[in-house]
Amino acid sequence: MVKVAYYITGHYSTERPLPDIEDLSSKLAKMYDNPLLRKEYGRKAMEYAKTMTWDFACDKWKEILVNVLDPTSRELTLLEAT
């Protein structure tokens, strides 16, 4: 992970992290100089990307909505998917 230099406040009072430029450039140089590391990161990225399906996204949204509508409940009654 790249170190965060500081946060800026955007629309709707959301905070966005800005990276530490020295840390970011150091890590990019390390990856540029190491083909085995690039290959490993690429493999891990593909594994992660394969988990990003519509079913996964729907399950995550369902979880969020359940917690927003009724934080004490783990069941979604009004918006239950069929």
Image: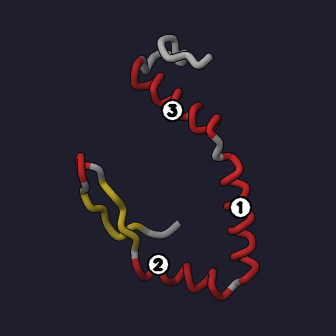
Which comes before the other along the chain, label 2 or label 1? 2
In this rendering, the label closer to the viewer, 1 or 3:
3
Q: Residue at x 70, y 84 (%)?
A: 34
Q: Quadrant of residue 69?
A: top left
Q: Position of residue 71 (x, y in %)?
A: 43, 21
Of residue 79 and residue 8, the one placed in the foreground of this image is: 79
Q: Where is 58 relative to 37, above or below? A: above
Of residue 71 and residue 11, the one placed in the foreground of this image is: 11
| The C terminus: image quadrant | top right
Q: Position of residue 9 (x, y in %)?
A: 24, 56
In this rendering, the label closer to the viewer, 2 or 1:
1
| Circles 1 and 3 in contact, beta carbons < 8 Å | no
Q: Secondary structure at mark 1?
A: helix
Q: Residues within 10 Å of mark 1 (few under 14, many from 20)?
A: few
Q: Secondary structure at mark 3?
A: helix
Q: Residues within 10 Å of mark 3 (few under 14, many from 20)?
A: few
Which comes before the other along the chain, label 1 or label 3? 1
Amino acid bearing label 2: Asp
Q: Residues within 10 Å of mark 2 (few under 14, many from 20)?
A: some
Q: Position of residue 64 (x, y in %)?
A: 47, 30
Measure the alpha-carbon separation of dots 3 and 2. 34 Å
Amino acid bearing label 1: Lys
Q: Is residue 3 left or right of residue 44?
A: left
Q: Where is 80 relative to 65, above or below? A: above
In this rendering, the label closer to the viewer, 3 or 2:
3
- The residue to which callout 2 is attached is 23
- The residue to which callout 1 is attached is 44
Q: Is residue 78 left or right of residue 33?
A: left
Q: Secondary structure at mark 2?
A: helix
- The residue to which callout 3 is attached is 61
